Image (cartoon, coloured by chain):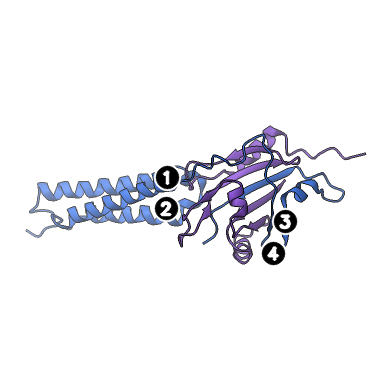
Chain colours: A purple, B blue
Amino acid sequence: MRVIGISNDPPGTSREHRRKQGYTFTLLSDPSYEVIRLYDLAHEKAGPAGEDVARPAEFLIDSTGTVRWVNLTESYAVRARPEQVLQVIDELGLGRPAAASP
Amino acid sequence: MKRRWNISIWIGFLLILTAFVTYVTVFIRFPITRDFPWATLLIFGAGLALILRGLMRASRAPQLYRGRIAGPILMALGAALFLLFGYGIFYAARQLPASARAPQVGQKAPDFTLPDQDGVPVSLSKLLASGETGAARINGALLIFYRGYW
């Protein structure tokens, strides 16, 4: 299961943020909001300098590319907790390694 | 006789400032105190209660306690900070776009290619199709959209 963070920050900012927080997962940059808009998550002018940002959202996607779980919270202060996501992964049976091909 | 300092009012106001500061520096980091800020609301409540107690003392025994002027001012400031906090958490943080066209459960996640933190392009479809050599196939991806790091 790959964890991928996406925001409108440029790669330089993401690299710095990742380094400071000690993250090991990938952070992708979407400064032109192409993917943020594709997923309908644009929050106009909500950034600190009045720029658009992505509203917080989590999507669990299986290996076929199908969305299996979506989390769009009511408040930007509330995010999915790790244990919540792990529980969903368990319930959907996504965490089990696929059988090795013959 | 010499009037006593109305400690209640000052400690109450200090608690209110503490409520604000501790939310932003400490409680905001943990989901258990951030999702619903009960700890901060408790500290605010204690602060407001103390100021109120001090105000009542000052008005009942003005010859004994100071605070006839400082009291109402601190109460007003304290209440304003509390309302500001409440507004921020219960109203402003909820002003989010409807996102009605966001992919739903059962739909295919729209494919995309974006640069990672080192500028290397990452494609969702390629990521899902690939497998680690020798190890289990990739089970999927968790996409976390966030507001950015300021």
Q: In this view, does A50 lie to the left or right of B76?
A: right
Quadrant position of the C terminus of chain A in the picture: top right
Q: How crowded is mark 1: few (under 14 residues within 10 Å), some or many (20 or more)?
A: some
Residue B37: image tag:
1
Three-letter code, disc 4: Gly
Figure check: B44 above or below A13: above
Residue B143: image tag:
none
Q: Earlier in the sequence, mark 1 or mark 4?
A: 1
The quarter holding residue A95 reads: top right
**Residue carrying label 2:** B23
State the separation of the CA atoms marked 2 and 4: 35 Å
Q: How crowded is mark 3: few (under 14 residues within 10 Å), some or many (20 or more)?
A: some
**Residue carrying label 3:** B122
**Tag 2 subunit:** B
State the separation of the CA atoms marked 2 and 3: 37 Å
Q: Which of marks 3 and 1 is nearer the N terminus?
A: 1
State the separation of the CA atoms marked 2 and 1: 8 Å
Three-letter code, disc 1: Pro
Q: Is mark 2 on a helix, strand or loop?
A: helix
Q: Earlier in the sequence, mark 2 or mark 1?
A: 2
**Tag 1 subunit:** B
Estimate the x, y position of residue A49 in percent, counting from the top left. 46, 62
Three-letter code, disc 3: Val
Marks 2/1 in contact by CB < 8 Å: the verdict is yes
Q: Which of marks 2 and 3 is nearer the N terminus?
A: 2
Q: Which one is closest to the eye, mark 1 or mark 4? A: 4
Three-letter code, disc 2: Tyr
State the separation of the CA atoms marked 3 and 1: 37 Å
Q: How crowded is mark 4: few (under 14 residues within 10 Å), some or many (20 or more)?
A: some
